[in-house]
Image (cartoon, coloured by chain):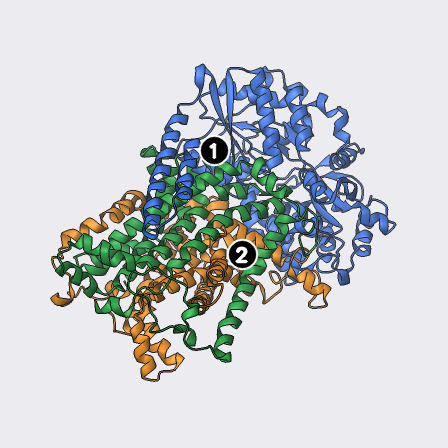
Chain colours: A orange, B blue, C green
């Protein structure tokens, strides 16, 4: 996928292609996806763009009307917008980076043969199955100074009663990161584990014959093979983490003192709680444009650094 | 719906071959989808035998409440054979989004249980039907508590009645009766008692704190409850429309409230919302907690009735100010096709039979004056505390300005980060309250201009 | 990083042979360091995973108000409260219907489109991919009103189909792109060989590619299943009758401004997680190396 997005359409040599490939087949195959997206998403996306050009606050119907670029002008002067943007970048970068690194390590471990592997895999993947509302509640209870781990640690003399990672200066961010990692690592682990299965074994054999160490084997055999899937998965995951509002909203409501407010959380506060759809839509469209730009840059870079694609 | 069990059986019966698994799953999925689609068609016909079916959306979904509401509905249906009511429960954090979507897409139900704080947005969208005429015609106006009727009307931007004054909440301070007893303390009766108990019952070295303070989402209600009565200020706005949040007495009381943080409370209260506070109180981490009478059953379930005491916020320097007297009731939608039937249900919740059952089961103060005299009213410790305070001479009720369109966005979204700065010590209560007062004053002046 | 290799290199099974346990067939013994590299990270990971899960078990099995670290004496009161009190059985059935159907639809559409992306070239491929990607950039919460209008226009609101479709649509880009990646990793020579043997493209795909695609199907399918299983917002917004709600809605009932029943929530959560974990414990066996020497030489 990575190679196909950024690369100009370059026909592979005819010999590499199965015979009889025609564009008509391809359109037939992607038709269901195209139809679904056109029917169900085209108009909603368009309507968000339209709303962003309007004054539309449900609590103030008298002020409704066309706004032109008013909302966007307000946004450029909005301190919360800029602050939330910085925090969003930090959140996505750290979260996805760590999810990937730990997910990769977990996949490599779980790909080995050992007694009890099936059970270990099922357990390691189980957080992914826990619904969002429950994940946040579990972590709230875990971090709570009375019902959480802190209480039992304090009773053993480690740390202080009445404190929580969620509200101490400097630890709030990491407390949130850990809670989200819990759910995010399994995603990468499953994906990479599945991808590892198609690494041709004789490549490892050949590497072994060449006397390659574990690191060499990883960098010359495993990594090139899973790279493409990883590139695209990190991108999609980054978009999801970008738009992940529930965890932050429930655990800190963007606090303390606004320090964990992401842009989409700000959107949720504006459009959903305060019911200001116009301004919320302008924030959403801005996020859309930023994500489009960032994705293109990301794909260009990750595509450029290695050209062993197909 | 029974057809939906089918796929599970399919999955269970076959020993799953590897390829068979996918095929079976595919069949199961299609079968289930079809089954549900079919049953969807079957149900939507609804309303058998000419009976009218009303849709009721409830915005508070605690399982016990749901059971009580369903009982109330069946009591009503027994009395009104031609009317059926379908219940739908909507979770606390999402119901406004669902209702707004329904209003925008013209798919509103007939009945709703909005909170007073939701009325500004709902009335602005012209969604609810005014009830004043019907109340008068039904002869119910005289049966209902004047205070609650006034409060219900005051919550709407146009001063009309949209929300039935069926029941009311009231603020109380919950305390651990068993801890007080152990420490030889009497139930607190003054602010000085409260401060002393908060210090006395704090034992940070064993993880017990005197109080749990709401520093996170929804902090404003607790702030008002702990500050206004102590300051003895009984209105939100002065005659000239400026906010009383910057009143020197309010600022002084707020300083005392903030001083509890980190000393008589856990430091983690900085981001505590209701979930966090209730987990702390229910598991022995805090001796006192401010909330409304509505959560009493929850504390009793966690700790047992003998361990939970309740008192109303204490009298101020020269009067008793009541806070949190917010009506909770029912409303009907403007677009309902069954206005008469919907009203019948609203009326039933205010008439003695329905009102008595619903108020008692909910643990809320009843709106019907006859019901208010019933014996059970004083058997609930939280309710008794609220009523005792209300019976004091010279008592005044503080109304929060829910009618201001911006009230919710200012107090919930805008002020939260600033409030947390106050707790962290980087903003003084004085500066915080002055800025908050300015924002509310602006909103109030704008409102006054629009409403003459 | 020795973890990347397998101990039994060269001991690979014949193509299409059922995955068997091969600990016994291990040739050389693991060294101490090697074993440490396996068990140390594994233990740490499992600890990280299990502590929060244990907290859920703790709250689910101990009486309300208890602060014991071990749920003893065990109480099932939370489970019965959830199962009987809140109509959980119905939500459970609905969730299964929605999740299974989303899994099937997502995987099939993903496989079709993925094949086109992996094996065929066609004008507009890049545009298609960019559009797919862009659909992910706007959160569903911002599009609820127009989405509701569309479903309403198709008479799909208040039907589980609205959830199946919405979950599938929002999950489609991931399914497509991942599937394309997995298909691309199956050597094209295998397919060509089958076609030389006289199979049509469809038969060649079913006979050669599909068996090797199992790990990919497990990954894509489980992602689709779980995202539908846990979707909350669409269920709340598109469904307006109590007996068609799903499990996450049932769970959300237990948390509110006037009371939070953590015990019941934990019990409900365990009920919701259990089938997924059991299912995954079963399907994870397809996550084994499928491409052996023989297959590639084909």
Residue identifier under label 1: C243
Residue identifier under label 2: A254
Q: Secondary structure at mark 2?
A: loop
Q: Nearer the viewer, residue C277 or B333?
A: C277
Q: Which class describes the residues within 10 Å of circle 1: few (<14), some (14-19), or many (20+)?
A: some
Residue C162 position, x and y percent, is: 37, 39
C28 horizontally vs B247: left or right? left
Q: Residue furthest front?
A: C24
Quadrant in which residue B157 is drawn: top right
Q: Residue furthest right?
A: B184
* Above or below: residue B318 compared with residue B285: above
Q: CA distance from mark 1 to mark 2?
A: 34 Å
Task: Name the residue rendered at 29%, 49% in the picture.
Answer: C108
Residue B406 position, x and y percent, is: 53, 43
Residue B270 position, x and y percent, is: 64, 57
Q: Nearer the viewer, residue A184 or C126?
A: A184
- Tags 1 and 2 in contact by the CB under 8 Å rule? no
Q: Are marks 1 and 2 on the same chain?
A: no
Q: Nearer the viewer, residue C109 or A297?
A: C109
Quarter of the picture containing the N terminus of chain B is top left
Task: Name the residue rendered at 59%, 50% in the picture.
Answer: B217
Quarter of the picture containing the C terminus of chain B is top right
């Amino acid at each position: 996928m990575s190679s196909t997005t950024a690369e100009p359409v370059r026909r592979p040599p005819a010999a590499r292609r199965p015979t009889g490939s025609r564009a008509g087949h391809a359109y037939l195959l992607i038709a269901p996806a195209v139809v679904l997206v056109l029917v169900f998403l085209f108009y909603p996306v368009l309507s968000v763009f339209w709303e962003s050009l309007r004054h539309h606050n449900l609590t103030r119907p008298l002020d409704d009307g066309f706004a032109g670029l008013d909302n966007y002008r307000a946004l450029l002067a909005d301190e919360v917008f800029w602050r939330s943007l910085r925090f969003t970048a930090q959140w996505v970068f750290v979260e996805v980076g760590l999810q990937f690194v730990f997910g990769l390590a977990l996949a490599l471990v779980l790909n080995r043969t050992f007694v009890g592997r099936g059970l270990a895999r099922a357990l390691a993947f189980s957080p992914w199955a826990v619904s969002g509302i429950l994940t946040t509640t579990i972590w709230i209870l875990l971090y709570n100074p009375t019902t959480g781990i802190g209480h039992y640690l304090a009773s053993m003399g480690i740390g202080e009663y009445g404190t929580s990672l969620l509200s101490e200066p400097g630890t709030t961010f990491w407390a949130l990161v850990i809670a989200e990692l819990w759910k995010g690592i399994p995603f990468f682990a499953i994906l990479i584990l599945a991808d590892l299965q198609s690494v041709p074994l004789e490549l490892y054999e050949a590497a072994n014959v060449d006397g390659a160490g574990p690191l060499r084997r990883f960098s010359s055999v495993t990594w090139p093979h899973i790279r493409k899937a990883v590139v695209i998965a990190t991108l999609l995951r980054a978009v999801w983490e970008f738009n992940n509002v529930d965890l932050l909203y429930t655990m800190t409501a963007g606090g303390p003192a606004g320090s964990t407010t992401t842009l989409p959380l700000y959107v949720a506060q504006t459009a959903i709680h305060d019911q200001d759809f116009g301004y919320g839509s302008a924030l959403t469209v801005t996020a859309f444009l930023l994500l489009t730009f960032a994705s293109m840059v990301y794909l260009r870079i990750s595509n450029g650094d290695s050209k062993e694609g197909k | 719906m029974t057809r939906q069990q089918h796929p599970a059986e399919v999955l269970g019966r076959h020993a799953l071959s590897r390829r068979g698994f996918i095929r079976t799953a595919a069949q199961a999925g299609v079968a289930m989808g079809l089954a549900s689609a079919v049953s969807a068609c079957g149900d939507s016909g609804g309303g058998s035998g000419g009976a009218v079916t009303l849709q009721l959306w409830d915005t508070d979904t605690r399982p016990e409440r749901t059971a009580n509401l369903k009982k109330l509905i069946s009591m009503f249906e027994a009395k009104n054979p031609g009317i059926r009511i379908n219940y739908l429960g909507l979770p606390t954090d999402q119901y406004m989004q669902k209702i707004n979507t329904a209003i925008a897409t013209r798919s509103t139900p007939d009945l709703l249980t909005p909170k007073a704080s939701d009325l500004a947005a709902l009335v602005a969208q012209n969604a609810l039907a005014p009830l004043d005429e019907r109340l008068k015609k039904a002869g119910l106006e005289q049966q209902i508590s004047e205070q609650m009727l006034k409060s219900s009307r005051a919550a709407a931007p146009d001063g009309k009645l949209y929300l039935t004054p069926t029941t009311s909440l009231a603020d109380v301070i919950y305390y651990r009766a068993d801890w007080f007893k152990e420490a030889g303390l009497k139930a607190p009766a003054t602010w000085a008692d409260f401060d002393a108990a908060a210090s006395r019952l704090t034992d940070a070295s064993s993880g017990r704190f005197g109080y749990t303070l709401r520093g996170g989402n929804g902090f404003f209600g607790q702030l008002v409850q702990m500050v206004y009565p102590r300051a003895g200020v009984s209105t939100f706005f002065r005659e000239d429309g400026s906010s009383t949040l910057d009143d020197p007495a309010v600022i002084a009381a707020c300083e005392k409230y903030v001083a509890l943080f980190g000393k008589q409370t856990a430091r983690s209260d900085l981001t505590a919302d209701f979930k966090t506070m209730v987990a702390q109180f229910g598991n022995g981490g805090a001796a006192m907690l401010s909330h409304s009478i509505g959560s009493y059953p929850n504390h009793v379930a966690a700790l047992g009735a003998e361990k939970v005491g309740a008192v109303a916020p204490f009298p101020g320097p020269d009067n008793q100010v009541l806070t949190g007297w917010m009506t909770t009731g029912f409303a009907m939608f403007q677009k309902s096709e069954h206005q008469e039937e919907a009203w019948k249900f609203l009326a039933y919740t205010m008439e003695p039979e329905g009102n008595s059952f619903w108020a008692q089961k909910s643990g809320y103060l009843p709106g019907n004056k006859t019901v208010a005299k019933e014996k059970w009213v004083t058997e609930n410790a939280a309710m008794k505390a609220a009523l005792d305070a209300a019976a004091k001479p010279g008592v005044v009720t503080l109304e929060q300005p829910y009618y201001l369109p911006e009230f919710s966005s200012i107090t919930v979204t805008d002020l939260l980060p600033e409030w947390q700065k106050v707790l962290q010590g980087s903003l003084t209560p004085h500066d915080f309250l002055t800025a908050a007062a300015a924002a509310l004053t602006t909103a109030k002046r704008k409102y006054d201009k629009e409403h003459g | 990083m020795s973890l990347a290799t397998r101990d039994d290199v060269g001991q690979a099974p014949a193509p299409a042979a059922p995955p068997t346990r091969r600990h016994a067939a291990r040739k050389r013994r693991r060294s101490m360091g090697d074993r440490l590299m396996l068990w140390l990270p594994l233990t740490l990971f499992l600890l990280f995973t299990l502590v929060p899960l244990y907290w859920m078990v703790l709250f689910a099995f101990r009486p309300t108000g208890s602060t014991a670290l071990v749920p003893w004496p065990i109480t099932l009161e939370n489970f019965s409260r959830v199962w009987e009190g809140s109509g959980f059985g119905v939500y459970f059935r609905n969730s299964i219907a929605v999740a299974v159907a989303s899994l099937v639809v997502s995987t099939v559409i993903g496989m079709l489109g993925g094949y086109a992306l992996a094996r065929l070239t066609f004008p507009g491929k890049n545009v298609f991919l960019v559009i797919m990607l862009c659909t992910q950039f706007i959160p569903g919460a911002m599009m609820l009103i127009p989405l509701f209008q569309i479903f309403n226009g198709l008479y799909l609101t208040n039907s589980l189909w609205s959830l199946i479709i919405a979950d599938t649509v929002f999950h489609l880009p991931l399914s497509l792109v991942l599937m394309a990646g997995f298909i691309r990793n199956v050597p094209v020579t295998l397919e060509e060989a089958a076609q030389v043997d006289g199979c049509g493209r469809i038969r060649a795909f079913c006979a050669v590619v599909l068996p090797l695609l199992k790990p990919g199907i497990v990954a894509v399918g489980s992602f689709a299943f779980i995202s539908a299983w846990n979707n909350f917002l669409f269920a709340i917004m598109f469904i307006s009758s109590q007996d068609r709600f799903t499990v996450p809605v049932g769970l959300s009932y237990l948390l509110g401004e006037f009371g939070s029943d953590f015990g019941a929530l934990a019990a409900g959560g365990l009920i919701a997680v259990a089938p997924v974990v059991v299912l995954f414990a079963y399907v994870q066996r397809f996550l084994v190396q499928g491409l052996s020497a023989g297959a590639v030489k084909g």
